[in-house]
Amino acid sequence: MTAGGIRVALVDDQPLFRGGLRMLIDSQDDLTVVGEAGDGIEARTMVREAQPDVVLMDIRMPVADGIQATEWIVTDAASAKVAPRILVLTTFDLDENAAKAIRAGASGFVLKDAEPEFLLAAIRTVHAGTAVIAPAATTELFQHFGERAPQPGDPDEHLADLSAREREIFLLAARGLSNSEIAKAEFVSEATVKTHISRVLAKLGLRDRVQLVVYAFERRLV
């Protein structure tokens, strides 16, 4: 691994699957596996000790599942200097549990049978601060959030701190548009879009674009 590379932790109850992931990840110059765990409780302890940048988290595990582990790690990270990004591993692209893990604080999910290059790219993307969701599943995954009862308060109350341009970009991002697509729609540069997205996340108290989408669906803004 090169200096300043990405530290990755593996959480899955199948040792053979973890072994395959370790071999794949450690074959990359910029990635290295710094810890493994077979259940949610082990994962919480391991993350505290290993301090990974990205955690690959299985959902279905004994003792404590990936949803619970994600909640613990996100809570622990609230008082830590560096919060790891959590990338959920799931078998089904419309897995309800994957959506629950995202609600708990995960930055996205990938399928267990994804191509190796896609998984490696997902790790790098999440580490860079961008959410990762299997493209075909984005709308369907969050649809059930819109079916929930709306959060208390007028949606405009939650968005009052956003400028007109920030609100426009917020709604486009909530629909799943990329920075380049938003830039074309708003006739601005991608750098400007990134700046506005960062301000929107800060003003709404959201960690990443996945939470932004959840926020919008919960309030039926998209």
Image (cartoon, helix red, strand yellow):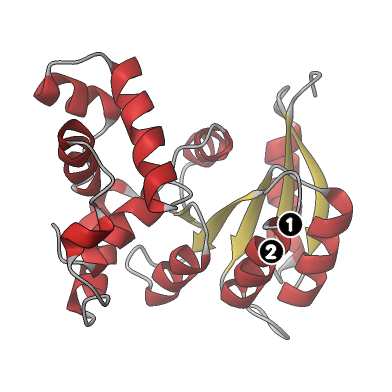
Residue at the extreme bottom of the image, as rendered: 63
Residue 7's x, y, as percent? 75, 38
Circle 1 Cα neighbour tier, 10 Å, few/some/many (<14 / 14–19 / ≥20): few
Residue 53 is left or right of residue 185, and the answer is right
| Vertical placement of residue 149 versus 135, above or below | below
Residue at 72%, 55% in the rendered image: 10
Which of the pair 160/144 is nearer the observer? 160
Res 170 → quadrant: top left
Q: Secondary structure at mark 1?
A: loop
**Left or right: 131 as drawn, with respect to 185:** right
Q: Quadrant of the rendered structure where residue 65 is?
A: bottom right
Q: Which residue is mark 2?
A: 73
Q: Is residue 184 above or below residue 19?
A: above
**Residue designated by label 1:** 79
Closest to the observer, 222 or 43? 222
Observer-nearest of 30 and 70: 70
Amino acid carrying mark 1 in the image:
Ser
